Image (tube, rainbow, N blue to C red):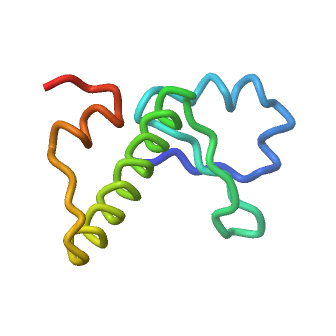
Amino acid sequence: MPKILPISDLRNYTEVLNQVDVDKPVYLTRNGRGTYVISKIDDYDREATVEDLIKEIKKGEKSAVHGKASSIKQVAQNFGVSL
């Protein structure tokens, strides 16, 4: 179950930060509406990597339609992964 707190709880930010854990962000609300998320940096980095991967997949799909496909090895090398 997600941890949802009012933004006013940041007055005691140490307590709020202690509630953040890997795969368990804290959601902050303002006037009853979700406004911010506090998460561990590892979670943020993982999400950024996934977003980059999705962008590359979409670029690959577009280039494949135009006959400019890349091999899986080329794509893996772009991400620093060896197959």
Write down the quadrant of residue 30 in the picture. Answer: bottom right
**Where residue 46 sits: x, y (%)?**
42, 35
Q: In the rendered view, does 63 fall on the left or right side of 46?
A: left
- Tell me if residue 40 comes above or below residue 3 in the rendering: above
Residue at 53% x, 37% y is 44
Foreground pick, 44 / 5: 44
Residue drawn at point x = 35 percent, y = 34 percent: 79
- Please say if 27 is above or below 63: above
Please indicate whether residue 22 sits to the left or right of residue 12 in the image: left
Could you say where residue 14 lies in the image, as x and y percent from the top left? 75, 23
Residue 51 falls left or right of residue 11: left
Q: Tell me which residue sits at (72%, 53%) in the image.
A: 6
Q: Is residue 32 above or below residue 74?
A: below
Q: Residue furthest right?
A: 11
| Residue 67 percent location from the top left of the image | 19, 71
Nearest the eye: 53 or 20: 53
The residue depicted at 13 percent of the width and 26 percent of the height is: 83
Residue found at the far front of this picture: 67
Residue 19, located in which quarter of the rendered image? top right
In the foreground, 26 or 43: 43
